[in-house]
Amino acid sequence: MKRILCSALMLVAVGINAQEFFTVMNYNVLNFPTGSMENRQDTLKKIIDFVEPDFILLQELKSEAGLISIAEESCVDLEGEYRAATWETLQSNPNSGWPLQQNIVYNAERFTLYEENVVLTSYRDFNEFIFYFNSEELESQQDTAFLYVYTTHLKSSQGEDNEQLRLEMVEYFAAHLATLPLDAQVIIGGDFNLYNSDEPAYQLLLSEDNAIQLEDPIDMPGDWHSSGYPDKSILTQSTRTSTIFGDGAGGGLDDRFDFMLCSENMLDGSAGYQYVNNSYYSLGNNGTCYNENITDCMPNFSVPSSVMNALYYMSDHLPVIMQLQLDQTSSISELNKKILLRSNMVDEILRFNQSLNETVEVYSVTGKKLLQRQLNGKSINISDLSSGSYILVIGEETSLKFIKL
């Protein structure tokens, strides 16, 4: 126990100055690996090699073999060990005549996939993946911060009925957010099929009434489908004026369908994982393209010509990219999901997610023991403690920091 406490106190006293940067890519890969142009692993590999993402949020997957091939073939030359999460068939609407799955491929050398879940809706799933960063200090400090990553594909097409289905899906997701820790760090990406920022589904995603406030990192509202929208650089669909072998959408680049949103704490500096300012962009979009093939919008110095051609042939969507950083001095929020506090910001009562039968000690950040109890339950009254930061030690394995308000 002394070793654990010393590690915790050292972390609070001197901190860990290392910052880790990593890249997140969201991509609708168009009926992969089937469709009219089967496979395309090599085409996707050109894009992935250029971006070097640590997370690849995927939509329009058609088979488990296709998902695995992205990890094992398209990511084969990346530094690290890339894995696919568990394949999940569509559960929300299992009788759909055109089932599309979402999933994720990730760099397992840098992140551990702690838990996977499916959030059911009235139309199509939200897939949940909970990660933690593989810090070199993790074993000695027993401490990490979880990152909640979601990917989804909202109902497509214009019209009131389709807007209502998109809203219904988001309503289920908003209800799910209320089940997460209040300080959860959240990313949601997907093909949202939104035409403008006034649409109810988009407004609900960003609603201040949600248990966890989400924000659009680029904050560029408007009618994204309109030719008058001023910043064409954020558009993502379609890469082609005509379908290729009858697959995908044509019409040229004229919609912002593909998004990534972050929880507010990832943009305001209060979380361990932080969005890197001005790092969000649509890959291959130079801002001059509208209702054209992306390969015709030249010159385009944002990507090599080989990557531009790969983007054209791979999908009718462009990937969206953003970068995050992890300041490990701020990574103390959750330890083990089975025994963690409901929040590390507490008032009078420390509350746990399940009943514990453990010795519990509370120390000041200078190492003075202030409280020791045998816990048989799910809470401890700490009303006698003044406001400030403390170290909680549970049994002989776990220590973490909390703040009494």
Image (cartoon, rainbow, N blue to C red):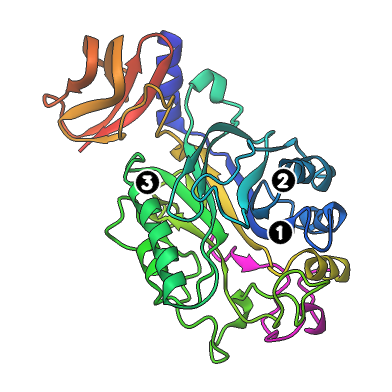
- Of marks 2 and 1, which one's residue comes earlier in the chain? 1
**Mark 3 touching mark 2, by CB under 8 A?**
no
Q: Is residue 366 visible?
A: no
Which region of the structure is painted magenta? 276-304
**Mark 2 touching mark 1, by CB under 8 A?**
no
Marks 2 and 1, how far apart at CA: 12 Å
Which amino acid type corresponds to the residue marked 2 in the rendered image?
Answer: Ser
Marks 3 and 1, how far apart at CA: 26 Å
Indicate whether 274 appears above or below 256: above
Which of the 4 image quarters holds residue 30?
bottom right
Q: Secondary structure at mark 3?
A: helix
According to the picture, the residue beneath numbered tag 3 turns out to be: 176
Pick whichever, 148 or 383, lies toward us. 148
According to the picture, the residue beneath numbered tag 1 turns out to be: 29
- Of marks 3 and 1, which one's residue comes earlier in the chain? 1
Which amino acid type corresponds to the residue marked 3 in the rendered image?
Answer: His
| Residue under the image location 46 percent in, 20 percent down | 7
According to the picture, the residue beneath numbered tag 2 turns out to be: 63
Q: Tell me the crowding category of disc 3: few under 14, some 14 to 19, or many 20 or more residues within 10 angstroms, Cα based.
A: some
**Mark 3 touching mark 1, by CB under 8 A?**
no
Pick whichever, 174 or 212, lies toward us. 174
Q: Tell me the crowding category of disc 1: few under 14, some 14 to 19, or many 20 or more residues within 10 angstroms, Cα based.
A: many
Q: Can you name the residue that lies furthest to the bottom here? A: 228
| Residue under the image location 23 percent in, 10 percent down | 376
Q: Secondary structure at mark 1?
A: strand
Q: Position of residue 157 (x, y in %)?
A: 54, 73
Q: Is residue 72 visible?
A: yes
Marks 3 and 2, how far apart at CA: 27 Å
Q: Secondary structure at mark 2?
A: loop
Q: Is residue 343 left or right of residue 35?
A: left
Nearest to viewer (mark 3 / mark 2): 2
Q: Position of residue 274 (x, y in %)?
A: 49, 51
